[in-house]
Image (cartoon, helix red, strand yellow):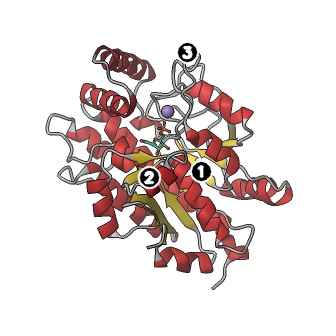
Amino acid sequence: MTAIVLHPEIEEALDRHAPVVVLESAVLTTGLPNRPWESNWDRAALTRAVPDWDPEAPLASELQHRMEQSVRDHGCVPCTTALIEGRLHLGIDSADARRLMSEGLGHKVASTTLAMGMGTGRSAGTTVSAALDACTLLRNRVEHDAWAPVLATGGIGGVHRGWSQRPDISADLMALSRTRACVVSAGSKSILDMTATLELLESIAVPVLGWRTDRWPAFTSSPPADTPSVESIDDLQDLGRICSHHWQDLGKSSAILLANPLATELTLEHEEMERLIAAAEDDATARGLDGAARTPFVLGWIADRTGGRSVAANLALLLSNARRAAEAASMLAGPHLANP
Ligand code: PSU
Ligand code: MN
């Protein structure tokens, strides 16, 4: 039994230097419920966000399927990463996905806990930091130095609110500072301190580019008036040039973050979201919730108070990021890398 399981389709794609889009899976096991759309949530909000979504489908499983399909529709190979019974899978099939969504439900591993999860035979979704470890494993198998994977997530982990009392900072940030990959996200998750997260990305020298926006996206919310700015690009050729300077000419080994904002008409009003986050956090504290139980409680609380609109927006931005990642991967792999 090997500790790393490389799916044959991914192995073949790496041999061809084909464009690969890596998908993290903590969003599937911990970020979204794996139940059908709730009957008391607003169906119209779901239809607006993802027009042909079947409300009976379990949300996370359906999302995994759709993100992979969307990557394929753009001519790229999807590589969902997951920890299944102690083995790190680089690429999963539908049987693996079912095992992940049963045994791994409610669990996630980060770069910090990946080896522990492997050593104790656990199943869990991989956060961005663990998926970036997977990106390094993929790159190590490709002899062409210019090849790099593109990773899609919803929002990266980052600096938590209240960081001055307790420096709760996601391992995603340090992983971004040491991994050659292009990462597509709609900013950082909304329950974080978004401005502090962007500041820290600057400190650790991770370039942040905005896709057709000069504002740091606020995940499912509309960006507030005082939102910090980022460098805007509106052409993927620019991304290609920047990646090539960063990795080839300058020899850097950090990620490049492409911030892809959710379509404005699908965002939730910023003030409303801030109010809900604060109230949900207060309720979580009053109930004495800590650690792993806290975030799902907060997300569920907000989902119920918005009639599922926060979930619909999260689904829409994840799908949009997968599409953007595939476009970026196709451009980065370009004809100069092809190995037919
Ligand atoms: N994006 C989402 N929902 C999520 C995540 C991202 O829309 O749940 C996950 C990603 O896997 C990210 C992780 O890496 O949250 C960050 O978790 P932590 O703060 O525990 O490092
Ligand atoms: Mn944390």
Disc nearer the start of the sequence (3/2): 2
Q: Check residue 183 in the rendering and tell me which mark sits there, or answer none.
A: 1
Tag in front: 3 or 1: 3
Residue neighbourhood size for the residue with mark 1, other residues' Cα within 10 Å, grouped as few (<14), some (14–19), many (≥20) = many
Q: In the rendered structure, which amino acid carries the disc numbered 1?
A: Val
Q: Nearest to the eye among marks 1 and 2: give it.
A: 2
**Location of mark 2 (residue):** 117
Mark 3 Cα-neighbour bin, 10 Å: few <14, some 14–19, many ≥20: few
Tell me which residue sits at (33%, 58%) in the image. Answer: 100
Are the residues at dot 3 and dot 1 in contact (C-beta closer than 8 Å)? no
Residue at 40% over, 67% down:
92
- Beta carbon of the mark 2 residue lies under 8 A of ligand 1: no
Please state which of residues 246 and 209 is positioned toward the viewer in this rendering: 246
Point out residue 215 in the picture as x, y percentages from the top left corner. 62, 32
Q: Residue at x 60, y 33 (%)?
A: 216
User: For the residue labelled by badge 2, is the local secondary structure a helix, a strand or a loop?
Assistant: helix
Tag 1's secondary structure? strand
Residue at horizontal 35 percent and vertical 28 percent from the top = 294
- Measured from the top left, where is residue 223 in percent x and y? 53, 27
Q: Nearer the viewer, residue 221 or 3?
A: 3
Q: Quadrant of the N terminus?
A: bottom left
Pointer 3 residue = 165
Vertical relation: 332 (above or below) 44: below
Q: CA distance from mark 1 to mark 2?
A: 24 Å
